[in-house]
Image: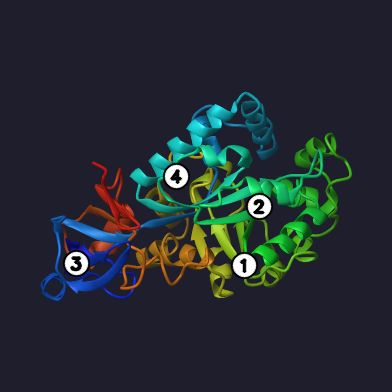
Amino acid sequence: MIIRARAVVTMDGAPITNGAIAVSGNEIVDVGEWESVRRRNSGQVVDLGETALLPGLINAHCHLDYTCLRSRIARQDSFTDWIRAINTERAKLTADDYVRSIDDGFAEARRFGTTSIANLTGVPEIASRTHPLLRTWWFAELIDIRAAQDVEEVLRMLPASAEGRGLAPHAPYTASADLYRKCEMIAHRENLLLTTHLAESKEEMAMSFDRCGPLSEFLGSISPDLFEAGGVTPAEHLSQFCQLDERWLLVHVNEIRDRDIERLGNAHIVHCPRSHAYFGHTPFESAKLRKRGLTICLGTDSLASNDDLSLFAEMRQFRKTEPSLSGLDLLEMVTVNPARALGRKDALGRLRAGHRADVIAIPHSGRESGLIDGVIAFEGAVSWSMIDGVSLENA
């Protein structure tokens, strides 16, 4: 199959005007100018007209469990109150509710151009009942605030056929050092990825430093001996018992001090711009993290703190707070960077021969000089997408 478009954004250089890609099976086999690709390849031609082809977008952090909670949680006075509210809503959900929620999330994410997703689930036992429409990395979310969890058993619940599996000890204030160590040991043994929420809120920082504030009071009423930090930042606490290497995706990382940045090791950072704005968190230290050489990816978090699952909207929100970021910087955070973080830099995130055929198309009829900014500005559903060589009309 040969797919032609007004422009092709490869993430390997300047966009190609009047470009095309050739696909065989689930793989891209050729990329270039339309006439050259057509001469070198045979097969069905799909002319997408006045569009731009892009690598499929990669959502590095999402909770599809909560797709059904859109607009169901009112604005709260604090992050702790939001946790109480979401726990109240979660208690009402059945297994069937979770299945529908996750499936609805897959469908919505695909409509907005996502082709790969890192999904955290607190109900791994129902994951095999869902119908992923995307490349899916399933992460089992683990909490031992009330009782110890059998990590091996939870891992076995995740679908074996998924793109990848991983472990997600929830956060240092809900997961013990022992749970983190156990997850890290199993991840190294089974070659799994790891992710955790780290230094998300001011209330977490207060709890970590001197065990005070609303989050400390709330969690202390459930399990007063769980949180083991005192007088240190969340990042410092985590680095004391975890080796933060390239298998880790650290999510949020809002409450950090300069001395914390070195403690993040070689982990990848995931920022969720609209969820960040929803809570009014401390400004994200993008410039310092990037200067340190850390990979930054974007995610949508959950619809308990967001309006939809559009990564285009996340890029636009991030540009509002970080206007110095170029359109290409932002696009890398939803393509090249998360492909690297998920261990697939040689297969995903670019339109390149030898990469998987994960492609999306959005309308484009303007000048190529403004193409990348036009991509960031795009709103709505994508008109066409392909995952693993299988195409879908979305309009």
Q: Which residue bears the numbered disc 4?
A: 132
* Depicted 83 relative to depicted 180: above or below: above
For residue 217, side relative to residue 167 (left or right): right
Relative image position of residue 196 (x, y in whole percent) = 65, 54
Q: CA distance from mark 4 to mark 1?
A: 27 Å
How crowded pointer 2 is (Cα within 10 Å; few <14, some 14-19, many 20+) is rated as many
N-terminal of the pair, mark 3 or mark 1, is 3
Q: Are marks 3 and 2 in contact (CB under 8 Å)?
A: no
Question: How far is disc 2 from disc 4 in space, using C-alphas?
Answer: 19 Å
Nearest to the eye among marks 2 and 1: give it. 2
Q: Which is more toward the observer, 157 or 169?
A: 157
| Label disc, if present, on residue 267 of the rendered structure | 1
The residue indicated by pointer 3 is 20
Amino acid bearing label 1: Ala
Res 168 label: 2
In depth, the one of 179 and 275 nearer the eye is 179
**Mark 2 or 4: the one toward you:** 4
